[in-house]
Amino acid sequence: MQSRAMAMAALMELLTDQPVIICNGFPSREAQKIADRPTHFYMIGSMGSAAAIGLGVALAKPKKQVIIFDGDGNVLMGMGTLATIGALKPKNFIHVVFDNEVYGTTGNQPTISNVVQLEKVAKAAGYVNVERVREREDLVYEFKDMLKKDGPSMLLVKVNEMVEDAGRVMLDPPDITKRFMNAIQ
Amino acid sequence: MIESDAFVQALQDIGVDFFTGVPDSILGGIIAELMERRLYTPAVREDEAVAMAAGAYMGGKVPAVLMQNSGLGTSLNTLISLNYIYQQPCILIVSWRGQGGKDAPEHLVMGEVMEPFLDTMKIPHRTLTEKTAVEDLRWLAETFMKQRIPVALLITKGVVKGLHP
C-alpha cells in the first residue's frame, strides 16, 4: 500500500488550475510540501468541513471542476455532507478520500473506516461515480476517468499510516483565502 | 410586521446572492420566499451551512446562512476556526428562540445567553425591528464588508411574517 503523500503527488501531477480544498491536519501540510499552488485551499481547523467548503465553491463556480482532498476522519465527522452533495448532485465535484483508518495528526487513534466503507455511503447518498483503489496505477486510471465524467464522484484511496515530514501550513489564514480567491476567479 | 418578500428583497438589494441554512419556524416565511425565488440551498447541519457559505464566498458570492439560535452552538467551531480566522464574511440570519423565557424548555438556556455568547465569540449582532429595519440592514451590509467576518441579524418571533400568520 502506498503512502498518502505518494498518492497525493500522483494526483497533483494530473491537476492544473482546478481549485483543490485540502482537509486539516497532515494532508494540508503534505500538500503544501509536495506543491504549493495558489489554487490550494489549506484547512487548518474546522475538521469535517472540507466537502462543505468545496460544495460552496462548486455551486458558486459551476464551470470549475472542484477537487476535495479529504481524510476518513474528516468524512466521518461531516458525514451529513455526503447526503447534501448526493441530493444536490453538483457535476463539477470530485471527492478524493485518503483512507488510512486512523486520526493521524493526533497519534493514530483508530477511526471506524475499517468497518464503514465510505464510498458505499457516498453511493447510497447519491454520488454518481464511486471507486475504491489501492494501487498507484488504479488511482491514476480512475482519477483521470473521473476528471472526464460528470460528478459528484468519490475516489476512496486506501493508504498506509506513513506521514511525510512536513511542517505546519506557513501562510496566514486570511492570505490563504485571498490567494485562493484570486486564483479561481 | 415585515413581509417575507420585502425582507428577502432587502437582502438581495444589499448584494446577498447565496442563501443556505437549516429551517426554523420563525424563519419559515423567509425560507419559503427564498425557495420560490430559487435562491435557497438547504444544508443538513448549521456547521455545514457556514462552511458552504465560506466556499461560496471564495467563489465570488455574498452568502447568508439562516438558522435557529441552537445552530450557533452546532456551528461554533466552524465559525471561529474557518469563517472568522480566514476572514470569510457571511451574514447569519438567526431566529431568537427562547427570548424572554417563553418557549419550549430546550430553547430557554440559549435564548437567555445568546447575546453574551455572540459577544464572547466576537460576532457582531443586532436585533431586527420593523421600525429600524432600513438601518439594521444598512448596518449589516457595512459591518459585514468592513470587518470580513460573520455578522448576525437576530429575528424575534412576529417581526417577519411566518408561514402561519
Image (cartoon, grey):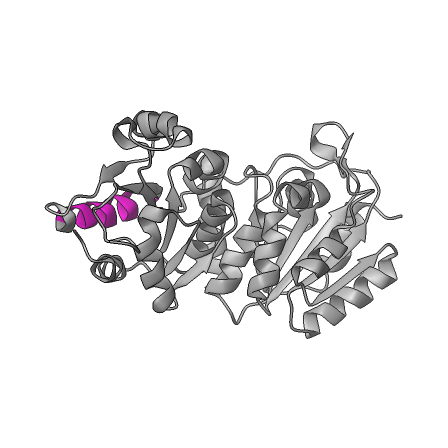
Q: Residue at x 32, y 42 (%)?
A: B95
Q: Residue at x 76, y 29 (%)?
A: A109
Whole-percent x and y of residue A35? 66, 51
Q: Considering only vertical position in the picture, is B10 above or below B120? A: below
Q: Is residue B137 magenta?
A: yes
Q: Considering only vertical position in the picture, is A136 above or below A46? A: below
Q: Nearer the viewer, residue B161 or A40?
A: B161
Residue sitting at the far left:
B131
Q: Nearer the viewer, residue A104 or A78?
A: A78
Specify the segment rendered in magenta: B135-148
Q: Residue at x 66, y 34 (%)?
A: A167
Relative placement, left or right, of A35 versus B10 is right
User: Magenta stretch: dominant SS?
Assistant: helix
The quarter of the rendered structure image containing the C terminus of chain A is bottom left
Q: Is residue A22 magenta?
A: no
- Residue A104 position by quadrant: top right
Q: Nearer the viewer, residue B127 or A106?
A: B127
Whole-percent x and y of residue A122? 69, 57
Q: Residue at x 69, y 69 (%)?
A: A147
Is residue B85 visible in the rendered structure shown here?
Answer: no
Relative placement, left or right, of B92 versus A171 is left
